[in-house]
Amino acid sequence: MFTPPRSQNGSPAAYANGMNLPASSAPLPAPASTASTTSPVAPAAPAAEATAPRPAPQARNPLHGVTLEAMVVALSGHFGWERLARHIAIRCFQSDPSVASSLKFLRKTPWAREKVESLYLFMLREQRRSGRG
């Protein structure tokens, strides 16, 4: 059998609106609309665009603005498909490699994409050290 909770003074707690909520936390009823001649509410003024904070530039991020396609083309041009397949052992680089098949696989596979991005960063560092970039 259900016994209602008791308040601090020992009497049964009052419930409002049949919602099993104590009266103190019951939602207030919506006020009835009696005036039909109310004035329309003025629309809010648009927020100024100049006050919106701009995101920090990614000047130190070498991958910013570089597409996955550009990475695959640069890697295949620098290493060749055979060496690229040795560095990253995935089938799209080993068997009948192409940019299109590689992109299709890399867009669906986050771990492989991370490896390609990592090798691309390694290639950029290598080029900078040797003075070719």
Image: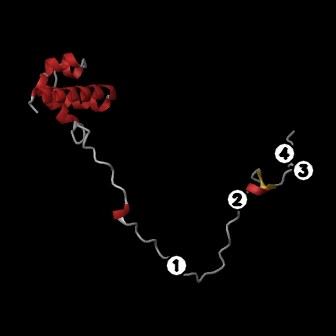
**Label whose residue precedes the other's in the sequence (3 or 2):** 3
Question: Does residue 83 appear left or right of residue 23 in this picture?
Answer: left
Q: What is the three-letter code of the residue carrying label 3? A: Asn
Mark 3 and mark 4: Cα distance apart in space: 11 Å
Mark 3 and mark 2: Cα distance apart in space: 24 Å
State the residue at coordinates (37%, 59%). Answer: 52
Q: Are marks 3 and 4 in contact (CB under 8 Å)?
A: no
Q: What is the three-letter code of the residue carrying label 1? A: Pro
Label ID, residue 9: 3
Q: What is the three-letter code of the residue carrying label 4? A: Pro
Q: Residues within 10 Å of mark 1 (few under 14, many from 20)?
A: few
* Secondary element at tag 3: loop
* Secondary element at tag 4: loop
Q: Which residue lies under the disc numbered 1?
A: 40
Q: Which residue lies under the disc numbered 2?
A: 27
Q: Position of residue 24 (x, y in %)?
A: 77, 57
Mark 4 and mark 1: Cα distance apart in space: 46 Å
Q: Which residue lies under the disc numbered 4?
A: 5
**Label whose residue precedes the other's in the sequence (1 or 2):** 2
